[in-house]
Image: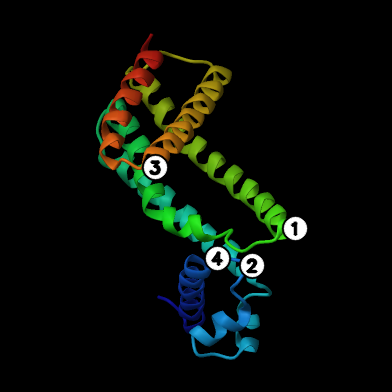
């Protein structure tokens, strides 16, 4: 059951996300967010100390939504190959859906703000990688335990996860540049088959 405070926090974050997406992080102020929800700025400070804190909370929701979608897709699929495919495809699809939000964030930033923003992005990036690595490790370990994949040492598995996630990011960048959504599924199918070959032999 949500408390009044929970609902207020949700409202603040939903409004802030919309404003960040429309105007970029640099241009939005605490006043803007307060005005958009019809509250005074002081009531905003009761929940969040700064705009950066609000932004962090918004990004955490975005990350959580992405990982929840990926976990759900993996759970729904049967067999290691389909689970891997679900992991890759959902990651690319969710990122595509969220692209509009992330694309606008650094609009209007000066050099110092951009530098700080890039540091924040690195922190968020490492958090995503850690959580995705954990999910992928569970998936692959399960596949090994069921005899669907060859046995691998912990260090081999760690390198393999790094290669898979890095390749997926590279694939995402190329698909973004081409902005051709019809290539996503065939690309993921090919990537999954290549990954499976490496995981079995």
- Ranked by sequence position, the earlier of labels 2 and 4 is 4
Name the N-terminal-most of marks 1 and 3: 3
Mark 4 or 3, closer to the camera: 4
The residue identified by callout 3 is: 91
Q: Secondary structure at mark 4?
A: loop
Res 156 → quadrant? top right
Quarter of the figure that contains the C terminus:
top left
Q: Is residue 71 above or below residue 36?
A: above
Residue 186 in the image: state x and y as whole percent: 26, 30
Disc 1/disc 3 C-alpha distance (Å): 31 Å
Give the image's coloring scheme: rainbow
| C-alpha gap between disc 3 and disc 2 | 26 Å
Using the image as rendered, state which of residue 95 and residue 73 is in the foreground. 95
Q: Which mark is residue 53?
A: 2
Q: Are marks 1 and 3 in contact (CB under 8 Å)?
A: no
Residue 92: x %, y % from top left: 38, 41
Label 2, secondary structure: give it.
helix
Question: Label 4 near label 2: C-beta < 8 Å?
Answer: no
Label 4: which residue?
24
Question: Where residue 175 sits: x, y (%)?
Answer: 38, 37
Task: Give the left or right position of residue 175, taking residue 124 as reference.
Answer: left
């Amino acid at each position: 059951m949500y408390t009044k405070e929970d609902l207020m926090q949700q409202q603040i974050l939903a409004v802030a996300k919309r404003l960040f997406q429309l105007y970029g992080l640099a241009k939005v102020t605490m006043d803007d967010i307060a005005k958009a929800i019809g509250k005074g700025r002081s009531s905003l400070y009761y929940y969040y100390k700064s705009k950066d804190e609000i932004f962090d909370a918004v990004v955490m929701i975005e990350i959580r939504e992405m990982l929840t979608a990926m976990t759900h897709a993996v759970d729904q699929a049967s067999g290691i190959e389909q689970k891997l495919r679900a992991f890759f495809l959902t990651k690319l699809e969710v990122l595509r859906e969220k692209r509009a939000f992330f694309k606008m964030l650094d609009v209007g930033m000066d050099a110092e703000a951009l530098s700080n923003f890039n540091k924040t992005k690195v922190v968020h990036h490492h958090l995503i990688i850690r959580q995705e690595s954990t999910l992928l490790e569970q998936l692959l370990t399960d596949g090994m335990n069921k005899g669907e994949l060859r046995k691998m040492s912990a260090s081999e598995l760690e390198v393999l996860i790094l290669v898979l996630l890095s390749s997926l990011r590279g694939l995402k960048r190329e698909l973004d540049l081409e902005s051709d959504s019809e290539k996503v599924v065939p690309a993921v199918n090919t990537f999954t088959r290549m990954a499976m070959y490496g995981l079995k032999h």
